Image: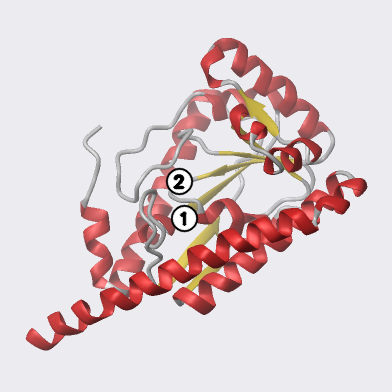
């Protein structure tokens, strides 16, 4: 018991050091690619997506080499062709860039304010992402549906986080109306995605824990399901899969259990 405690204590400085090195490499990599990739904007959306996927793949590589954190993709055979909605459980920033690997031509629904970030926002605009002003209520939903129809009609994919923001693993789900409204209005299939990324890359703080972060593509929900039934099915399937992935990670590394225990009451 004493030896185990001593090993865990000794591992903490190394975890902090590796996390610091990775965070430095991550942001330097992002800035360098944004600068070097400026000429790629001449190729429009294709050029932007090339740089985005390069950023995603190099970030995943750095994560594994520095932090010993591997990203595993499951259910890739469930990914449909053409235009569809990708409903992703959002636990950390990790899935934001690692999901780019299997997305040929996508638009992410995000806060409009992100498009005002110098240089980074330019990539979002040229890449024709969907910026929504959340403060506009019903008009924001109408804007989402209008832009969503255009994106899906062009055979592209739409990324949406059903809860609207990051939620820690194990927290009570808080799914919002937007994904069901988009599904009903566009008649597009929906691809649910479960993750356990929050166990390794927290919403806050800088530590990147070693292990295997899993991104799992679940079987698509076909178009035509009643809106309320769709909403219930989407939440049930994603949450059940996330619980399974969380449990699997804790079995592999019991120290991760403490990050599941810190549930939010609200």
The residue most toward the right is 42
Q: Is residue 9 left or right of residue 37?
A: left
Q: Is residue 155 left or right of residue 12?
A: right
- Disc 1 or 2, which lies upstream in sequence? 1
Q: Report x, y in % for residue 184.
A: 63, 24
How crowded is the residue under tag 1: few (<14 C-alpha within 10 Å), some, or many (20+)? Answer: many
Whether 52 is drawn above or below 125: the answer is: below
Q: Residue at x 37, y 63 (%)?
A: 207
Q: Secondary structure at mark 2?
A: helix
CA neighbours of label 2 inside 10 A, class few (<14), some (14 to 19), many (20+): some
Closer to the camera, 85 or 227? 85
Q: Is residue 173 above or below residue 79?
A: above
Q: From the image, tell me which residue sits under label 2.
A: 237
User: Residue 37 is drawn in which quadrant?
Assistant: bottom right
Which residue lies at the image location 78% right of the left edge and 52% below the top edge? 49
Per the rendering, the mark at residue 195 is 1
Residue 162 in view, yes or no: yes
Task: Name the foreground residue: 212 vs 5.
Answer: 5
Horizontally, residue 19 falls left or right of residue 108, namely left
- Residue 210 lies, in percent from the top left, at 40, 73
């Amino acid at each position: 018991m004493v030896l185990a405690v001593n090993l865990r204590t000794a591992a903490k400085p190394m975890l902090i050091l590796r996390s610091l090195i990775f965070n430095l490499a991550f942001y330097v990599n992002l800035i360098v690619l944004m600068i070097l990739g400026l000429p790629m904007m001449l190729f429009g959306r294709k050029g932007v997506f090339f740089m985005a996927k390069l950023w995603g793949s190099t970030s995943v590589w750095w994560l594994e080499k520095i932090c010993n954190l591997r990203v595993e993709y499951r259910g890739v055979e469930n990914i449909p062709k053409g235009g569809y909605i990708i409903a992703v459980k959002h636990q950390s920033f990790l899935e934001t860039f690692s999901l780019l690997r299997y997305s040929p031509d996508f638009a992410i629904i995000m806060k409009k304010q992100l498009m005002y970030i110098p240089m980074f926002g330019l990539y979002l605009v040229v890449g024709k992402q969907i910026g929504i002003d959340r403060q506009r209520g019903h008009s924001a939903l109408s804007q989402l549906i209008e832009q969503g129809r255009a994106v899906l009609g062009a055979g592209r994919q739409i990324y949406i986080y059903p809860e609207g923001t990051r939620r820690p693993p194990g927290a009570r789900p808080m799914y919002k109306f937007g994904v069901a409204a988009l599904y009903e209005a566009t008649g597009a299939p929906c691809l649910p995605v479960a993750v356990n990324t929050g166990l390794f890359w927290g919403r806050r703080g800088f530590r990147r824990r070693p292990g295997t972060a899993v991104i799992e593509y679940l079987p698509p929900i076909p178009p035509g399901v009643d809106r309320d039934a769709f909403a219930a099915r989407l939440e049930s399937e994603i949450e059940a899969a996330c619980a399974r992935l969380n449990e699997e990670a804790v079995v592999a590394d019991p120290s991760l259990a403490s990050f599941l225990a810190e549930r939010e009451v609200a």
